[in-house]
Amino acid sequence: MRPRLLLAGYYGRGNAGDDAILAALHQELVARVPDLQLTVTAGPHALPAGVERVDPRNLPVLSAVVQSSDAVGLGGGGLLQDYWPVRTDALLSQDQGGLVEYLATPVLAHLHGVPTVLCALGAGPLRTAEGREQAGLAVQLAQAGTLRDVASYEVLAGAAGRPLPKQFRVATDPAFLLEPDEAGVDELLISAGCAPGEALVAVALRHWPAGDPQTTWLEPVLQGLDPVLERRAARLLVLPFERTEGAGSDGDLARRVRQLRPHARVLADSPSPAQLAALLSRCQAVVAMRYHAALLASLGGTPAACLAYDPKVEQLAVQLGGPAALRQDSWIAVEVEAALEQALARPREEVRQHAAAASEAARATIDVLVEALSGPRPPAPAPVAQVVRRLALQRSVQLEQLREQASSAAAESVQGAERLVARDAQLLQAQGELARHQEQFEQLWSQAATRQQELDRLQADVQERERALAEAARREQQVAARLAAAERARDEANRAAAEQQQAVAERLQQAEQEAATARLVRTAAEEDLRLVTSSPAYRMAAPVWRLGNAALPLGSRRRALYHRARRRLDDAVPDSSGVPTAAVPHRPGTLDDLAQLSQFEQQARARGAERVVVVLSGTQLREDEGQRPTQLALQMAAQGVPVVFAYFRWDHVERHTEERRADGIHQVPLDVLLDQPAAVAGMFAGLNRMLLVAFPYPRFFELLARCNAAGWCSVYDVLDDWEQFHAVGQAIWWDREFEQHLVRSASVVTAINQPLAELVSSQVEREVQVVPNGLRPGLERVQEARPLERGEVTVGYFGHLTTAWFDWELLAEAANRTPTWRWYVIGYGGGPEKPLPDNVVLLGRQPQPSLAAFAQNWDVGIVPFRRTRLAECADPIKVYEYLAMGLPVVVSGVHAPPGADAFVERVDDVEQLLDALGRAAAQGADARGARREYAARCTWGSRTEALLGLVAGSRS
Amino acid sequence: MKVLFVYKFLTVGGVETVLRARIAHLADRGVEAHCWFFADYGGSALFRDVPDRVHVGTPEQAVKLIVRGGFDVVSTIDTEEILPVLAALPEPPPVVVEAHSAYLENLDYLLRLPRGLVKLLLVPTRGHGDLIADRLRGDWSIRVVPNPVADSFLLPLPVNEIWSASPQVAWIGRLDDHKNWRGFLELAARATRDGLDAEYVIVGHPVEPRSSQDLQEAATAAGMLGRLRWLCALPHARVPALLDDVRASGGVLVVTSRGESFGMTVVEAMARGCAVVLPAAAPYDETTTLGTSSLGYAPGSTAAAASVVRRVLADAELRSAVGEAARVQVLERYSAAATLGALVNALHEAAGS
């Protein structure tokens, strides 16, 4: 059988102080008596887990619980006071309340012969004879107990009229035993609007006098707090201790504080007592009217300035060793400010020590309760007295049940009477309405007769109108026939006019296009002229021409003779350049680039295209320059994918030079798209749309965001280590943050080789796929032989010659050491700073189709690049081209393409270079087929397929 | 019962989505719902399967339909233009005014409401109702009818593939001062300074020509452009998938708005089980349970917001618990079925039936 203890108190009523007492008692009792069954008289609010509740006004149930208990405890808390009327006649009835309600439990215990102890009970004030009498009764009903403080002891001794027996001792409030709980305190403070780590001064107030909504003392108290808060840069945190609603509640008071001091924060949540203690330990001080606010604060060493509305608060201030509590006549600003400063000056350790001492004293209550559970029952009264007690108890219970039944019957009678009254009222109303309806009926009957006469007259009128209407209809038919003939004639005229208008519009459009073309041609011509006239050659030649014009005036015989002689001379001397001299045609511009793009979209749809690619390129589409965006665009178009190729231009006049519309590629200046990002993102809806970004231009920000949101698959194809270009003064627009944004935002990120992919991944952690550069098939075919003098070993290079990556020193040193070798260099864009050995031949820039003819004379192709980050992140296309031409390759600075280690050797210095070249040249023609086979797998076509495969597998 | 909902523009927006859901679900409760718009800006596709229930035209044409069609109630959604025309009728139908806008200046028309005509004001939250009551003179009947979340947000949660290396911290809203996107960037910068490794996602379309440039400049100035993804004008149909990604990445949705009437974005994120960090203020103290189904911070405090974001990103258990509680709460309170009861009651009350 589990021991059972019943505690009578103010539990489960939403009062944090009483809940703290219960939590502490439960914590300590369970530790001492693990199988204890604890029941409390309680209201509807939450109780600690495992604690049962009983309604103190449900007398039959309360009596049964008392009877089944091993002991009854009265308290803790200040239960014995007569702030409210003491109705002794209501004891053991539903009307009982306050002091009398608390006494019901020990009275029942006495009747059932169950021992009662006082449990850290607070007493006073007792200002009425009834109050003192009932308090004395409590002492008489108890066998032992503890009082919360000395004042309570003295009040009870006064009520009893003599010193209390020795088994009644002075202890402290059990809440001193509570263990603070830090869990969830951060969230409580954040929910209240307090920033983490913010300095806080808590305030726990109550309406006083109880329920009085005036609180005239509030503003002076707050005025006392203001200067202290300002000096300490602290925020006021209001703690409503009693969770009830309405005027006069702590919540109402908290709202008033917020109205008066908007910067104050209010703890809106309902923490557990242990959390409340932990929260108070975070505060610098507490201003406490509430007894348990000061008590719980002391557990963590937080000092209190107490406002004593009741003697118990004064007692507590003494127990805590702090400044004396302020009585109500001292609740003025200057006193409150002084008290709070005095509290704040206390060392927290000193407060903690006082709390620890009080905690030790509080254990006496636990001892008393445990002893009561295991101790003997009070001696049984005489048999006659037992019968009388039982009868009294039964009568009380029966009386309550009868009162309940009577009350229900009375309520039902009242409801019945109310229903009867309501029925009477309805009847009266119905009678009134009936009379009204009769009156209305008579009026309507009279009106109906009048209306009938009007109706007869109207019928005659209608017949007359119908005859007129038939005549009108006949005339309308005649008019309609004439109108139809007129409309036919009008339509005919409109059609003719529309055809004329159409013809005029077409002529007008044609004229506008011609005019626009002429404007652009003129602008370009002016630009050409400006370039020519500002060139040194023109400036040198101009005086000669002026002299010629003076010597050979226009239209003169001398000029005609000159031109005849000049033509003969031209015919005799062939053109020495071999380069076409025709001017590069200027593409006619369009009046509306977007309109043309829209037209391209319609054509793509009409062709049944399923996908489209928009390439954002830093360069124009020029097939012979072999740029990666160009090659990818050409390949995609070749696979039937419509391509919009948007190219960067330095000014708004520049246009593309190669027309590719017939190949399925529409070219448009990049700035046109960037000016209309919303329109572009909305184009080609319903198709698989791919945005291929070939350089990290910060102005792509909005276009990228809109395309991503509209469901485009965005691909950032990393071609270079742009930071390195930027560092040497190129790509001046480059911005590290934007490139990271682009990498993060693109649906797919690709890079041309592994080092570049790793570089990008190291900056923004995401997957980067390698799609190497490729080869344009056919470049390896020799169109016309270009024989060259050969050496013991013949080495060749073609490509750009900028000193940013071309290692002229390495080439010169290698050539110096191999006087019997021949070194050929084809290219442009730079040159050596020092003279080269004689066995190095610079062939200048050569057309792409002729490269294979030159390379046919070589034993090895080389890529002699410096060991820089720029080169490290490059994937030279020439390597694939050398291999396609069947040449072995030796490189420095760059890496062999994936899978080409057997054909491409990487070296670090001149010795390694010469060794590798010697070995490569010795291979002869044996491995030529394998090299070509490898190169055949590296076409731009296969790269494009790889890229489209990545896009198909991406999330966009 | 027959009701006509009147709204200004027919686009593919949040209000239209709600109205489409109302047509479907109100029929189950015996209410024949029609919608009237003053102009069609491409939203008619939403109503393709119920063409006889959607009408477009001037306020005067709307009134002709109201008279001929025998409507019991007319409900306007922040659309005051219809009110004077209705007031001119000899026997106008009962009118309900739904006040949703969070922009206070957009609610000024409420000060001019014809008292005899308007029977009820409907608001999405109690807090918004209090705000409106403060602004209105006189004693108006205000009822709370929560907004329903679209069905697509209530579909079962998928187990998403985690494709983002860092947790995503998302922000959704118009790029204007009221929604306070700059506050989000400040939060991001602060959290990053404090050592948080996250990706920041802004979903929002520009409201002014310079908005895009402003965003780029502000993100660059805050040093956050490299950590930012921007999805401009993401279609509403794709938002559930985005929120699923945010949840799967171990991320959160953050709200920095200076005030909302309801906060549909928050409810949508909650529906997808995504933890939300928001100001501990109205209306979120009503639409969410702070600390349980959402995580609050002191309104206006970037430091507090960043602190909460860091804490929740570091605590998978907390994130999961908040996300789960959020979804349960939305399913209980904000499905179309759950919210329509209040709407139907209000319509009957206005109609006097």
Image (cartoon, coloured by chain):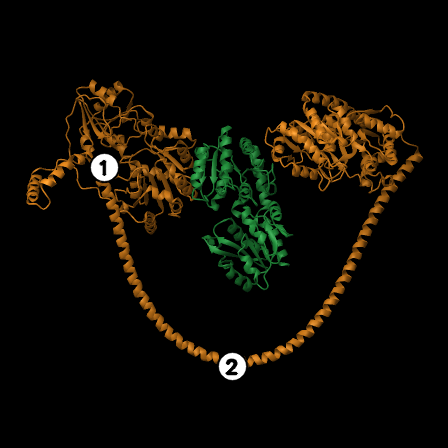
Above or below, B138 against A18 in this view is below
Label 2 crowd (10 A; few <14 / some 14-19 / many >=20): few
Disc nearest the viewer among 2 and 1: 2
The quarter of the picture where the C terminus of chain A appears is top left
The quarter of the picture where the N terminus of chain A appears is top right
Mark found first going from the N terminus, 2 or 1: 2
The answer to whether tags 2 and 1 share a subunit is: yes
Residue at x 59% of width, y 41% of height: B284
Label 1 crowd (10 A; few <14 / some 14-19 / many >=20): few
Above or below, B215 against A448 in this view is above
Q: CA distance from mark 2 to mark 1?
A: 97 Å
**Type of residue at label 1?**
Gly
Residue at x 89% of width, y 26% of height: A162
Which label sits on residue A778? Answer: 1
Question: Which of the chains bears the disc numbered 1?
Answer: A
Please give the residue where the numbered disc 2 appears in the rendered image.
A464
Q: Colour of chain A?
A: orange
